[in-house]
Image: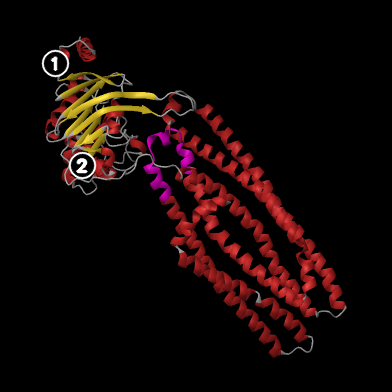
Amino acid sequence: MKNLRYLLPFFARYRLKWISGLVCVAGMAFVGLASPWVVGDAIDNLRGGITHAKLLGYAGLLVGIAIVQGLFSFGQRRILVAMSRDIERDLRNDFLDHLQALPPSFFQRSFTGDLMARATNDIEAVRQVCGPAVMYSANTVLAGCGALLLMTLIHPWLTLVAVCTLPLVAVASRYFGVRIHAHFEKVQEQYSSLSSRVQESLAGGRVVRAFAREHAEDASFRGFNRDYVERNRRLILWTSAFRPMLQLLIGLGYVAVLCYGGLATYLGEMTVGDLVKFNLFLGKLTWPMIAVGWVINLLQRGAASLTRIYQVLGTEPEIRDRPPLVNPTEIRGEISFRGLDFSYQAESDGAEEVKILRGIDLEVPAGSTVAVVGRTGAGKSTLLSLIPRLIEPPEGSIWIDGVDIRHLPLERLRSEIGVVPQEAFLFSTTVRENIALGAPEATMEEIQRAAQLAGLEDDLKVLPQGFDTLVGERGVTLSGGQKQRVALARALLRQPTFLLLDDCLSAVDTQTEERILENFRQVFRNRTVFLVAHRISTVKDADLILVLEQGRITQRGDHQQLISQPGLYGELHRRQQLEEQLAAV
């Protein structure tokens, strides 16, 4: 329950709203306490004689109390429930903002479905705490305390008899609350697993169908679904038993009041009207006592969900702005690597770090094109990911225009870089909107120009609606080569100072590649370009070619220099030439 303190900053944002809401709660509670008093007085008064004036007077008074109480009830719900929706929105926005700041390593050990469950189901449980739980807690305290005070004024000893079961209610609430909390945590964990399973099955639908695994996937999902239902049944068992248990304990108090109150009325210690008043006030106290159990249920659920949410929000972003920040007026594009060593952090205790890059020393003048080749796992993609700080480089290892990139504002650094990754990711919108992702203010002419440079013009002619064609989730309606070229056009449209192309033409045929590379001669001017590729034909015109082997630069030079030297580059060149010759036969 102590985790609920995390909500205090959110309540502080809406201070006036929750104060106004609590005023309405107080008004409803105190006005509601007037009706039992009016009814009791009416009974004693009408025993002396019934007149139309008396009946109309008491009836009008009760109607007036009901109207005022209804207005306060509307106000409390309108304000506090709306405020809980505001907090829900803010918490969900903060959750997504924080997720976007977390490094790739976090997502490598987290499931997408689990994160979605936290962003939806768990935040909804927290919202119940911020709205209904606050509203009913305040009503319980105010109405309960008011009813107890008035009951004491009527008959102190009878009040003591009425509350004799309260300790039992408190013990039952504690006992059930702990178990409801534990079961709700298990339900939320299983809901996350279920969501992850659905997301994974849908994302891998093509693979499932290709290997005829539909029945196996159905069986697996049913297992997850069955476990989710079973955990909910256990939770329902405890929550269902909670309220009847409270009603039983409260009912014992009613029995005691009727016995003792009837005797007191018979002995003349209180009037019939006072006994009616007392029982009506006890009824007012009954709902708060039952509401305590319901509120505890909400608080336990909300605390469990808030714990899961803050497991994410409490994860410190590894990649962030680090003072002292340097924000130059212009970035020319000169970049240097100084003794760069990089290792991936081992996930398990006692495991050795996985060293990816070793002793990278490199000076790249502004406007140069640097190609990086090497076998799979040599560290090529990692080297490119370090430049925009998608992965955090060691202090003092990468410099742009003489400034350590860790001290450049992160937003400024990335605004100067265009990245085309190995696996092109497209959003489920139009081709045009995907290209304009990094430059939403771009004109249609600029978008068309970027598409032309990326070699998309022929594809756009056959797409049903050209630039306005919806590409589907993750670009599912496009081929691998089309997705790569859309991602390439997206990067080119930004006209960045640095262009990082990570094997972005691997799914493109040779003829299209030649056409795109011809276009690149215009694009690469005055830009610093890093080009990762497996085809020698892609990199042969670069100003500098680096050969990476096991994280080290083993060869460097231009195409002519490297093919005349023994080493991996010459070997790759000869092998690819032979493959081309065999393909031509």
Per the rendering, the mark at residue 561 is 1
Q: Which kind of residue does numbered mark 1 sit on?
A: Gln
**Residue 495 painted magenta:** no
- Taking the spot 51% from the left edge, 55% from the top edge, the residue there is 127
Does dot 1 land on a helix, a strand or a loop? helix
How packed mark 2 is, by other alpha carbons closer than 10 Å (few <14, some 14-19, many 20 or more), is many
> Quarter-wise, where is residue 322 in the image?
top left
**Residue 114 painted magenta:** yes
Q: Which kind of residue does numbered mark 2 sit on?
A: Arg
Does dot 2 land on a helix, a strand or a loop? loop
Quadrant of the rendering where the C terminus is positioned: top left
Residue 117 image offset from top left, x and y in percent:
49, 43
- Taking the spot 48% from the left edge, 62% from the top edge, the residue there is 82
Q: Is residue 432 visible?
A: no
As measured in the structure, the alpha-carbon distance from the residue carrying label 2 to the one carrying label 1 is 34 Å
Q: Mark 2 vs mark 1: which is more N-terminal?
A: 2
Q: Quick check: 342 left or right of 366?
A: right
Rendered view: 251 above or below 570: below
Residue 140 image offset from top left, x and y in percent:
63, 65
Q: Which stretch appears magenta? A: 94-116
Q: Quick check: 135 left or right of 374?
A: right
Residue 131 image offset from top left, x and y in percent:
53, 60
> Quarter-wise, where is residue 571 in the image?
top left
Residue ID for mark 2: 494
